[in-house]
Amino acid sequence: MTPLLIPYPDIDPILIQIGPFAIRWYALAYIAGLVIGWRIMRRVCQQPPAILSPEKIDDFLLWAALGVIVGGRLGYVLFYKPSFFFQNPVAILTLWEGGMSFHGGLLGVVTAILAFSWRNGINPFMLSDLVALVAPIGLFFGRLANFINGELWGRPTDVPWAMIFPRGGPIPRHPSQLYQAFFEGVLLFLLVLAVWKLTDGRRRPALITGVFCMGYGAARIVGEVFREPDSFLGFLWGPITMGMLLSVPVFLFGLVLVVLASSRPPLPQQ
């Protein structure tokens, strides 16, 4: 019996093109995540315990953007296709063709947070908690961009909402990009927002960061169950994929932060 399929909405990855200049949904996803996250950080940065002014958040936006882009690209180069890029180093600069790693972007943002905090004399975990609060927004838009690009599709399935992706062959597949947008974006944002608003988490430096890392690690591992492994990597050991492997230390790091932050007394109300 042929499964009932939902037609894949074949959206052009290029929104507007004028000659050689093109605006792609992939780039807009990064811009939307950074801008919306920046606006939210500006609103909450002065809530107790206030550590930065809105003007300092403006300054940090550039640091964060560089961390996401440089770290995300280098992470993809080193974690996923090192041999190809070592043989074709110029291809590292072709960002418009896709190829970004969340785990690399995470390391890039961590570097930006540490450098910015050192320069401004603040606790880096208090800044990372602000970033963790808004990071799921960028993840949400990034996964939607993956879906529009018709990339990172899911494994073969016969569920009623399966789709046939243009570059994924004639086999119905999970729209795993949408699953990941929901788990890593919507659910994770609601989780960190609840900890921020309903607990004293904002007065426990590193707690929000730890919750985010644990939530992302768990969400990514679940999402990888439905996502087709990269063709150039496949499965590493048994059912384990590269995305799962890289997410385990993220989850464990978050667990350590949550335990340590919970064991310390909260900062006093201001």
Image: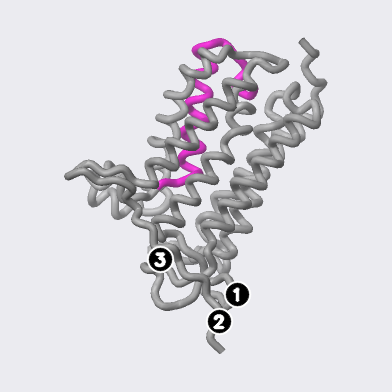
Whole-Å distance between the Cαs marked 3 and 1? 23 Å
Total of numbered circles in the picture?
A: 3
Name the quadrant of the C terminus. Answer: top right
Position in image of residue 154 (x %, y %): 51, 66
Amino acid type at circle 2 is Pro
Queried whether the magenta region covers residue 112, the answer comes back as yes
Q: Main secondary structure of the magenta part?
A: helix
Q: Is residue 102 left or right of residue 252?
A: left
Q: Which residue is mark 3?
A: 231
Q: Quadrant of residue 41?
A: top right
Whole-Å distance between the Cαs marked 2 and 3? 25 Å
Q: Residue furthest bottom?
A: 1
First in residue order: circle 3 vs circle 1: 1
Q: Which residue is mark 1?
A: 159
Magenta segment range? 100-126
Tag 1: Cα neighbours inside 10 Å, few (<14), some, or many (≥20)? Answer: some
Position in image of residue 128 (x %, y %): 60, 27
Tag 3: Cα neighbours inside 10 Å, few (<14), some, or many (≥20)? Answer: few
Is disc 2 in contact with disc 3, using a CB cutoff of under 8 Å? no
Q: Which residue is mark 2?
A: 3
- Report the mark closest to the observer, 2 or 3: 2
Amino acid type at circle 3 is Ser
Position in image of residue 216 (x %, y %): 62, 46
Q: How is the image coloured?
A: one colour
